[in-house]
Image (cartoon, rainbow, N blue to C red):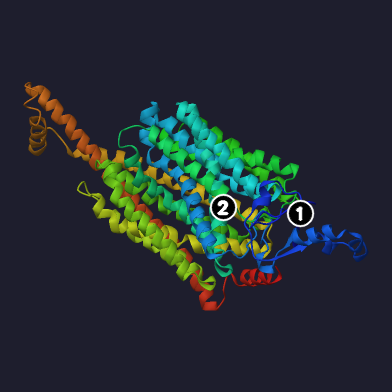
Amino acid sequence: MSVSCRRGAQPRKGGLPAPVGATREDRQGSAPEGRFISATERLPARKVDRLPAVVLERSRAVATAYEFKPHERPLLPGSPATPEHPLGRRYAYFAVGTLLGITGGLNNGLLTANLPQIQGSLGLTPVQGGWLTAINAMTSVCMGMLLIKFRQQFGLQRFTRVFLVAFLCLNVFQLFVHGYVTQLIVRGAAGLVGSALTTLCFMYIMQSLPASMRLSGMIIGFGSSTVALPLARVISPLLLLDGHIQNLFLFELGLTLAALASVGLLRLPPSERFQAFERIDFLTFALFAPGMALLCAVLVQGRIQWWTTEWLGYAIAAAIPLIGIALLIEHNRANPLLNTRWMRNGNILRFAVVAASMRILLSEQNFGSIGLLTAVGMGNEQLVTLNLVVVFASIAGICVSLATLTPNELGLPVIASIVLIGIAAWMDSHATNLTRPANLYFSQALISFAALFFLGPMIMIGIFRALARGPSHIISFSAVFGISQTMGGLIGSSLLGSLQIVREKFHAFQITQALTTTDPQVVSRIRQLGGAYASAIGDPARQQAQGTSLLAQQVTREANILAYNDVFLLVAMLSVVLTVWLSGYWLYHKLRGVNPLAEELVAVQRMRQTT
């Protein structure tokens, strides 16, 4: 296979010539080792003999086409070629890829870590703050499948610049225009750009790895985005040291500038392009995306406005037919955007359920542990060390996952991760009002390790099942994986958050029922609490009222702690159920001596040999 140039196009020094129909940006990819073919080699001999000597000499000096080696060819249209790079350039690709992954993750992580501060700075209500989270999820949940086709039709360089330049403009805009609407626009764009940067992240990292390890680049790419959330909690106290929320926006602008400069200086090799979009793709997306967006809104706002709010029911009623009609259209297409026949396969449904369930279990950390420590009076400043532990444990999870990844045993790491999460959740379920970040180092390290340890096998299972059916199924895999991760995270936060609210009310009622003014211990406690204000409040009645108010606050705190213990216990129980199910499935195939992925592994190996 060869990638041809327009007539007269010259390769940049150290670069590839442009493919047919390439833009100016596509002509500036990085150079592999290979063979250039001069223009005269493609002409008939009789015409070559008639050319002047100067033209012949110049045509030999100027290469107009590049012939890829078999192992350098892109696996999929829209993906970059994989030439042999010198060692220094490999290090550069890895560094740029890591920067892109962290940038994409921090766009969402800084919002999650500093949502109360953003709400306070802009004077937002909890409902408005929830919409900032919801719109970020809305724009990212379905973008994976659309971005693949965008790359295939318009090329990698245009893909990169469109999204990064647009987001840079929005970052500059939010520095000068402060307001709720501005934040909604920026956070919506951040969800879209985050998906694009994650894709670019693992494409860059793949360039830095040898051929036998290139699929590991996808694991590192997704892992980099995951590590960004605890990293955001580490750096946020430093950014807000002077109390100005503007520092967050400046930091986001700096990251975007660094990412844009990096991809401009070190570009990906060119990719193959073709007419990927069909008109009916936009009809499917126009139905499917609003349906998923409505579900995201319901999951975010349900526990804030509570589930009995009327408009939530209307949103669900509208989402179901929108998604259903979109899937019906795809089911009857010859070249579907979403391959519903493949997606309804039992193995794929099981993959989606497990991937979403893992995100629900991992909400123990993002919602549970942070919420517990907030309930006992801890702020971001006191959680820096804990989040550093989480960051290092996450990195360890990526490294161990890559070191132990075996195609024939992809199920065991997933089961082991679920067991680790269950153990950590059970440990956390014994929290008291004396629990501090140091008490959670080990349990949160286990969860962070498990969060990245399971990621590699899950991605490999999905990739193998998609590639075995053909490269066109990668779009469907991207949709299944992206939706399961986003929706699983939202379901986890919604489920655990709703349970915490219900159990807090229950425990507060139980504690209050046991407190009576005829109990000498209660009277003594109110007197002690009110006595702390004796120097400022001389009226005994007002001192008693102040003591009663402080006691009510302590009751609320204890009820919250008990409610979080119930949340952790639920996560531990769900982990047990999931472990039993997956262990039974794994043991069934083990006793029969059958590898569930045997056919897929053979098909992928055959594909590698023919490309």
Q: Is residue 91 visible?
A: yes
Viewport quadrant of the C terminus: bottom right
Viewport quadrant of the N terminus: bottom right
Sequence-wise first label, 2 or 1: 1
Residue density around tag 2, few if under 14, some if 14–19, many if 20 or more, within 10 Å: some
Q: Nearer the viewer, residue 504 or 393?
A: 393
Q: Tag on residue 266?
A: 2
Indicate the position of residue 503 as horizontal and vertical percent values.
32, 43
Q: Is residue 579 visible?
A: no
What is the spatial separation of the Cα atoms under label 2 and label 1, in whole angstroms? 21 Å
Local secondary structure at mark 2: loop
Name the residue type under label 2. Leu
Indicate the position of residue 539 as horizontal and vertical percent values.
7, 21
- 297 versus 608 height, above or below: above
Image point (42%, 57%), residue name: 451
Q: Is residue 118 left or right of residue 83?
A: left
Residue density around tag 1, few if under 14, some if 14–19, many if 20 or more, within 10 Å: many
Q: Can you identify the residue that label 1 sits on?
A: 5
Q: Nearer the viewer, residue 378 or 57?
A: 57
Q: Nearer the viewer, residue 262 or 557?
A: 262
